Amino acid sequence: MSRGERKAMIARDHPGLSLSRQCQVLAISRSSFYYAPKGESADNLALMRRIDELFMKHPFYGSRQMVRQLRRDSIAVGRHRVRRLMRLMGLEAIYQAPRTSDPHPAHRIYPYLLGCHPILISPPRDKVRNVIHHPINSPAIAPIAAL
């Protein structure tokens, strides 16, 4: 169930449950219950209209090119604002995506040779024991070991 549906279930004048208890039961914070979205300003709506006009002419413009075009039209606006408004309107630049993972049909596909062999994560136990345990029987190493 969406947050809007749960928010609509809350009754302000319920005799048995307080608002805070209803919000707790429906897993909604009280601040989000009282919050009323403001909407876009008149400046943003005018800018969105202009972005839409430009996008109809140039559907391959992303936010960066759109900002350059708007600045040429003497509209001072930042890229992140244009990006947010384009995302809000559902506008996305049309471009050819890179196909870097597609193999060329003429290239040979080599077999994977390690597929049947297990990968050894640790060395055999007898070699580990020999590496860790070194008896000091040599007279040259004895004084160093005593330090």
Image (cartoon, rainbow, N blue to C red):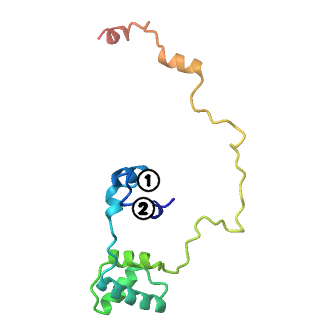
Residue 79 image-quadrant placement: bottom left
Which of 122/28 is in front? Answer: 28
Residue holding disc 1: 26
The earlier-in-sequence mark between 2 and 1 is: 2
- 17 lies above or below 60: above
Name which residue lies at 39% across and 89% down.
49
Numbered disc total? 2
Tell me the number on the disc at residue 79. Answer: none
- Percent x, y of residue 91: 47, 80
Image x and y of residue 105, in percent: 71, 68
Along the viewing direction, whichever of 3 and 136 lies nearer the viewer: 3
The amino acid beneath tag 2 is Lys
**Which residue is more in the foreground, 142 or 109?**
109
The residue under the point 33% across, 12% down is 144
Secondary element at image label 2: helix
Q: Check residue 7 in the rendering and tell me which mark sits there, or answer none.
A: 2
Q: Quadrant of the C terminus?
A: top left
**86 left or right, relative to 77:** right
Q: Do the residues bearing badges 2 and 1 touch, measured as CB atoms within 8 Å?
A: yes
Q: Residue at x 44, y 6 (%)?
A: 137
Residue 38 position (above or below residue 7): below
Q: Which residue is located at x 34 percent, y 88 percent?
A: 46
Few, some or many residues within 10 Å of mark 2 (<14, 14–19, 20+): some
Q: Is residue 118 left or right of residue 98?
A: right
